[in-house]
């Protein structure tokens, strides 16, 4: 099969990471070309031919409209020249121009779009366009049932929607393989990871951590983002600078999962939750706020992880304490989490995307 994938940029995000994993599987049996509007600074490796349109996002409404039409025209030309069997676009910034472009080539049945984010927190213009434009592609792939249900509430026909969970990378270290503990890791720590923005809600994690009675436990948060300064000030005000560590981006996250007492997701919203599955794959028990939508689709409470009421800091503190002091519960969640993570096999899930030829 000749496959074209369209994505706006390739930074260090969940959608980009997923496409990297999928492309490594698709290339084994297909011809793969990946069109990127802004192909500078690829954060992950890609398999297939990369076509960089060099059309980055621009500021200002008129420049955004101008750039949209430039992307749209480029896509029309490429779709006609390449004549692929299937086109897959990732995220709204690629979905909208792809829908317009493929409609001009007269074959919308070749297009699958992928919705990677919670529609309720998208830009207003995106929420307005989705009910009209997303009726046309052959299929819409979402990464969770919750995102799919949100689209149905917006008027998208249920039959159009297919849920395919995000795969783990095939390069995930086997739990039987020993990993060296990172040099700068505290002796005992709990772990958080993700972009430092308001949706990841790390303020609540810091609050919950500040309630712990065990003064020998540390909190490590991996990631970068616009909330860093705010979080640093919060840590300073709580006199926790010696026990909370914002370590930024790391080259190899797997040992951090492996040696953590537990992994904590404090997000306000999660369309899926790659980091939770990654933590499970390394035997790290997970506790998460039961936000919309991903955590409750990954975790069965008290079986393979712990779910607590969203934004309930006291309950989060209690759940973390349980995982720190109760070896039996931690062992149970670790074991069952490993089993759960094995269900997100890259080979199996990547094949699901190509069943709509």
Image: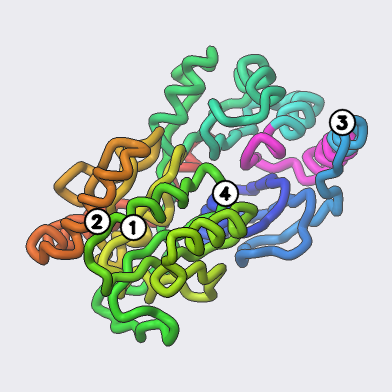
Could you tell which of marks 1 and 3 lies nearer the N-terminus? 3
Tag 3 residue: 61
Q: Which residue is mark 2?
A: 320
Proximity of marks 4 and 1: CB atoms separated by less than 8 Å: no
Report crowding for label 1: few under 14, some 14 to 19, many 20 or more residues within 10 A (C-alpha): many
Closer to the observer: label 3 or label 2? 2
Task: Name the magenta segment's main secondary structure.
Answer: helix
Location of residue 230 by image quarter: bottom right
| Contact check, label 2 and label 1, Cβ < 8 Å | yes
> Along the polypeptide, which appears first: circle 2 or circle 1?
1
- Between label 1 and label 3, give the one nearer the viewer: 1
Are circles 4 and 3 on residues that touch, CB within 8 Å? no
**Whether residue 241 is situated above or below residue 230 in the rendered picture:** below
Mark toward the start of the polypeptide (3 vs 2): 3
For residue 325, side relative to residue 196 (left or right): left
Q: Residue at x 70, y 39 (%)?
A: 94
Query: Which residue ends up furthest to the top in the rendered image?
Result: 155
Q: CA distance from mark 2 to mark 1?
A: 8 Å
State which region is magenta. Answer: 69-95
Q: Earlier in the sequence, mark 2 or mark 4?
A: 4
> Which-is-in-front pick, marks 4 and 1?
1
The residues bearing labels 4 and 1 have C-alpha atoms spaced at a distance of 18 Å
């Amino acid at each position: 099969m000749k496959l074209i994938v369209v994505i706006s940029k390739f930074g260090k995000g969940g959608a980009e990471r997923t496409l990297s994993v999928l492309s490594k599987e698709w290339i084994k049996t297909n011809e793969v070309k990946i069109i990127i509007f802004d192909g500078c600074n690829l954060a992950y490796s890609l398999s297939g031919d990369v076509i960089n349109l060099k059309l980055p996002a621009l500021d200002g409404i008129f420049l955004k409209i101008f750039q949209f039409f430039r992307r749209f025209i480029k896509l029309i030309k490429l779709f006609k020249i390449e004549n692929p069997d299937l086109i897959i676009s990732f995220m709204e910034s690629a979905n909208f121009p792809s829908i317009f472009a493929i409609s001009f080539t007269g074959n919308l049945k070749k297009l699958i779009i992928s919705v990677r984010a919670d529609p309720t927190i998208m830009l207003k213009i995106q929420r307005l366009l989705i009910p009209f434009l997303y009726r046309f592609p052959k299929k819409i792939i979402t990464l969770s049932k919750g995102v799919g249900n949100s689209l149905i509430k917006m008027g998208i026909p249920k039959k159009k929607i297919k849920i395919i969970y995000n795969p783990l990378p095939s390069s995930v270290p086997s739990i039987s393989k020993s990993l060296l503990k990172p040099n700068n890791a505290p002796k005992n720590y709990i772990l958080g990871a993700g972009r430092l923005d308001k949706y990841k809600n790390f303020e609540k994690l810091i609050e919950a951590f500040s309630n712990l009675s065990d003064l020998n436990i540390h909190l490590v948060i991996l990631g970068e983002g616009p909330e860093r300064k705010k979080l640093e000030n919060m840590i300073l005000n709580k006199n926790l600078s010696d026990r909370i560590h914002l370590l930024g981006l790391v080259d190899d996250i797997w040992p951090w999962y492996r040696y953590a007492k537990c992994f904590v997701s404090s997000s306000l919203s999660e369309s899926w939750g790659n980091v939770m599955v990654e933590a499970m794959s390394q035997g790290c028990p997970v506790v998460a706020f039961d936000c919309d939508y991903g955590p409750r689709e990954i975790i069965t409470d008290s079986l393979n992880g712990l779910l607590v009421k969203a934004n309930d800091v006291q309950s989060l503190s209690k759940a973390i304490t349980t995982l720190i002091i109760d070896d039996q519960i931690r062992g149970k969640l670790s074991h069952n989490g490993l089993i759960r993570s094995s269900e997100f096999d890259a080979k199996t899930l990547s094949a699901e995307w190509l069943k709509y030829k």
